Amino acid sequence: MLAGSAAAQTQLAILNVQEAISRTAEGQKLIRELEQKYRPTQQRLESKQNEINRMRDQLQKGANTMSQEALRNLNRDIQKAETAMQREVEDARGEFSQEQGQLFNEVGSKMMAIIDTYSKDNGFHIVLDISSPQSPVLYAVNEVNITNAIITAYDAAHPSGDAAPAN
């Protein structure tokens, strides 16, 4: 009976931590900076993809007029370029993901202090993170979602002067 009474008084909230981190003013600023940092890489890869597409077009247009050796050489060049491009894309994605993870961890560590304070101030005993597909939360009413409140509290505690306002 006591366990039922305690459970009835337990305050529960849900929070989408990934959304909260990415929607804070600081999170948005860091994401923009990261995207800007990798923009030259993205442009370089797009240029390489355009070159591969140009070679494919050349192969298709010249299939009937090119010698067998020229066709083999062009096919080999396309395959080499595609393999190199694939490796570069994978490397760039890995580097981007690693840096993005570091940024999320940086903001996330400060976010945890905000979540702790906000939860204590608002009487929440349990806060569940719903940002992961592996989340055990199968259903939750939106009234217990504190994501927007956490974003507001974070922005107040960690202002980022040149960031755009959160959505």
Image (cartoon, helix red, strand yellow):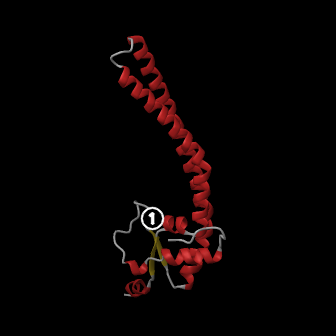
Dot 1: within a 10 Å radius of its alpha carbon, few (fewer than 14), some, or many (20 or more) residues? some
Left or right of 141: which side holds 101? right
Residue 94 vs 2, above or below: the answer is above
Residue 26 at x, y percent in the picture:
61, 67
Tell me the quarter of the picture where residue 9 sits: bottom left
Residue 98 vs 119, above or below: the answer is above
Q: Does residue 99 appear in this view?
A: yes
Residue 33 at x, y percent in the picture:
62, 57
Left or right of 92: which side holds 52? left
Q: Amino acid at mark 1?
A: Ser
Residue 71 at x, y percent in the picture:
40, 16
Q: 80 or 154: which is nearer to us?
A: 80
Q: Residue at x 56, y 48 (%)?
A: 96
Q: 32 or 148: which is nearer to us?
A: 32
Q: Residue at x 58, y 48 (%)?
A: 39
Left or right of 1: which side holds 45? right
Residue 37 at x, y percent in the picture:
62, 50
Q: Does residue 86 appear in this view?
A: no
Q: Residue at x 57, y 59 (%)?
A: 31
At mark 1, the secondary structure is loop
The residue where tag 1 is placed is: 131
Q: Quadrant of the N terminus?
A: bottom left
Q: Residue at x 44, y 20 (%)?
A: 74
Tell me the quarter of the picture where residue 65 sits: top left
Residue 84 vs 151, above or below: the answer is above
Q: Number of callouts in the render?
A: 1
